[in-house]
Each structure stands twice: as C-alpha cells, then as structure tokens.
Amino acid sequence: MSLFRVNHRFQIPLLMAFPILTTAAALCEHTYKCWRVDSPITVDGKFDEPVWKQAPWTELKENDSGDQPLMQGKFAMLWDSRYLYLAYDLVDRNILSTIDHRDALLWIQDVAEIFIDPLQSEQIYYEFQFNPRDNFRDLVVMHRGTGSDIYPLGEWASATLVKAIVTGTLDDNQDNDRGWTLEVAIPFSDLWLAPHIPPREGDRWRMNVFRIDYGLKEPELSAWNPTRGPSFHIPTKFGTLLFKQRSNTK
Ligand SMILES: [Ca+2]
Ligand SMILES: [Ca+2]
Ligand SMILES: [Ca+2]
C-alpha cells in the first residue's frame, strides 16, 4: 500500500507508537512454510490444482487489532523452479476496482499486496499490489530503517502473471458481492536480490501479506503480520517465508 499513504493526520501517532511496536514485533512474527510443487499450476484465478488444497492457507488479521477482520481473507503460497505462486481468497461484499492499467496506485481501491525481502535486510524489499481487474504494480522499496521512511523504485518491472476472479459485480454497490480470488506467479528470475535463484530447501526470506478492503465505510486494512499502524512499510514486522521441499520432490 500506500507509499505515500501516511498523511499528516497519522504522523504524530505513528511516531509515538513506534518504539512500542518495535518491541512487539518479535512477539507476533510467523513463519510461512512454502512447499515446492512438481505439478503445473495454471494462473487462472482458480485453485483447482490439487496442490493448492495441500498448501497452508493462512488467515489475514485486522491490521490494528490483530483480530478477525470484517472482510475475511486468506492466502497460500507454493513454488517451483521458475515461480513463486501466491493465492488470495478474499471475502468482499462490495468490490470496488476501476483502475485497469499496470503500475497505477492500486491501493486506493480494493487491493491485495505482498512485500518480499529475500535478503532479510529490513531495508530493501519488493512490493507487489494486485487488483480484481488482473492488474499489478511492482516496486523495489528502499526503507531507511525507521517508521515508514521509504524510497520507492517504480521503474523496476517484473514479468509477473496475475489472474483474478470476481464473484459479484464490480463497482456496483447496490448489490451484495461474495468476494474475489487471485492467483499470481512471480518469476524468481526477476527477484534478483535473492541469494539463490531458484531458492533452495531451507532458504528463509522475509515477507508480509496485506489486503485493503474498500466498501461503504472506512477502508479495512488486513495483514498476515499486523503492523499495528497506518503504514504497511514496517519491515521489522515481516514474517519469515521458509522454502520447503518434500523428500520425494525433485
Ligand atoms: Ca489455477
Ligand atoms: Ca471491497
Ligand atoms: Ca457489487
């Protein structure tokens, strides 16, 4: 989200809260076990490949409280020799998305996001935003190390594949939508910060997964590891992405 989202309204509370948040970071960190697959995944927004059923589906939490959000969402991840696969399953009663081109500011409408730090640097990481119209925005982000002091490098471009399926009506708030799914494949060859391409069994990166839901009321922010503030750009709050390979998988 929101490279420029921290507005004046939020600045003082964020700075005051940050020392407390740093201490809390270690308490809420998670590890996501990402399993290697040897069967093909078609990026079509459907999770009918058997391997998706075996992946650890993980709930997102409301970003301030850590509680269950009003609009629930979950994600799962897999990998093979070429791609990091990502799936979102998002409940959404009012799906809002009019932006239909790449690299737009997608976070101002319904969006799913992932931040990926292959070096575990907490200083430089990739950011991806995805919307229900199959668009994405990709960035490399330099993070200064405090708060949400960031420098985005928007010229970086990846050959990421994205497909969403909307169950409901886009941009019609007179009805009751069900939600949207999103299937994504990020080429490892574009993640050139990674120590190994493709990753090796046991490699650990850092990441966080987010979603912003826009409806009739205030936007609801959700996260795998809640940042407990208005910005998602708190890399000390990222969790661990652990690459796993079953012994019978080559
Ligand atoms: Ca699929
Ligand atoms: Ca929505
Ligand atoms: Ca609708």
Image: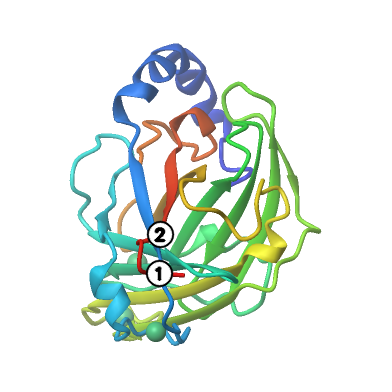
Q: What element carries label 2?
A: loop
Q: From where the camera sits, is residue 181 visible?
A: yes
Quadrant containing ligand 3: bottom left
144 on left or right of 220? right
Amino acid type, label 2: Gln
Q: Residue at x 28, y 69 (%)?
A: 92
Question: Which color scheme did the rendering employ for the protein?
Answer: rainbow
In the image, 49 versus 15, the foreground residue is 49
Q: What element carries label 1?
A: loop
Disc 1 crowd, CA 10 A, few/some/many (<14, 14-19, 20+): few
| Residue for badge 2 | 245
Measuring from the top left, give residue 68's x and y in whole percent.
Answer: 18, 47
Measuring from the top left, give residue 122's x and y in whole percent.
Answer: 59, 31
| Residue for badge 1 | 249
Q: Give the numbered dot on residue 199.
A: none
Measuring from the top left, give residue 15's x and y in whole percent.
Answer: 51, 17
Measuring from the top left, give residue 163's x and y in whole percent.
Answer: 48, 82
* Above/below status of 183 relative to 238: below
135 on left or right of 226? right
User: Mark 1 CB in 8 Å range of ligand 1?
Assistant: no
Q: Quadrant of residue 44?
A: bottom left
Disc 2 crowd, CA 10 A, few/some/many (<14, 14-19, 20+): some
Q: Which residue is drawn at 43% across and 47% down?
A: 242
* Above/below status of 51 relative to 154: below
Q: Which residue is drawn at 35% across and 68% down?
A: 248
Q: Which residue is drawn at 57% across and 55% down?
A: 199
Q: Label 1 near label 2: C-beta < 8 Å?
A: yes
